[in-house]
Amino acid sequence: MALTLLEELGKKERKNKYLCLKFNTMKKIEQSELDQITKANSDFAQIKETIANVEIQKHQSLHKLSALQVEFKTLEDELIKKYGDNVTINIKTGEITENVEDK
């Protein structure tokens, strides 16, 4: 017949007809140490989240940049078709200057 844990302990630890149970008491770090490690862990997690958000923004910005490059190339091709490929266009003023070939 199997004995329960209390019965088993009772057989081993009986003193003066009373059952004495021994409980393991866990050791703990000091509160200040716990506070320090908790804060460090929280700071670490916050910085990781910040880095993740920056990486997401970077990824989105790279997609926008790629789309702008395609748009720029399309506009450039339209202008070359309209004004020729032997001109320089000042993008601040819109002035067109024909390129002179050196001989």
Image (cartoon, grey):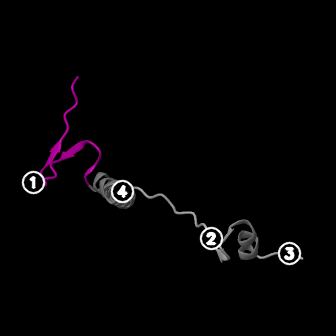
Is the C-beta separation of discs 4 and 2 under 8 Å? no
Q: Is residue 103 above or below residue 11?
A: above
Label 2 and label 3: CA atoms lie apart by 19 Å
Q: Amino acid at mark 1?
A: Thr
Is residue 65 rendered magenta in the image? no
Which label belongs to residue 93? 1
Q: Between tags 1 and 4, which lies in front?
A: 4
Q: Amino acid at mark 2?
A: Leu
Which of marks 3 and 1 precedes in the sequence?
A: 3
Left or right of 34 in this view: 99:
left
Pointer 1 with pointer 4, Cβ within 8 A: no
Residue type (three-letter) at the residue carrying disc 3:
Ala
Marked residue nearer the N-terminal end (1 or 2):
2
Report, in whole angstroms, how far the alpha carbon at label 1 lies from the one at label 4: 70 Å
Among all residues in the image, which is located at the extreme front?
16
Residue drawn where x is 13% and y is 55% of the image: 94
Q: CA distance from mark 3 to mark 4?
A: 41 Å
Q: What element does badge 3 sit on?
A: loop
Q: Which mark is residue 2?
A: 3
As displayed, is residue 33 above or below residue 22? Answer: above
Disc 1 vs disc 3: which is toward the camera? 3
Q: What range of the chain is rendered magenta?
A: 83-103
Q: In whole angstroms, how far apart are the C-alphas of marks 4 and 2?
A: 27 Å
Q: Which of pointers 2 and 3 lies earlier in the amino acid sequence?
A: 3
Residue at the disc numbered 4? 30
Q: Earlier in the sequence, mark 1 or mark 4?
A: 4
The residue where tag 2 is placed is 21
Q: Is residue 101 magenta?
A: yes
24 relative position to 39: left or right: right
The answer to whether marks 1 and 3 mark residues whose Cβ atoms lie closer than 8 Å is: no
* Residue in view at x 71 percent, y 69 percent: 9
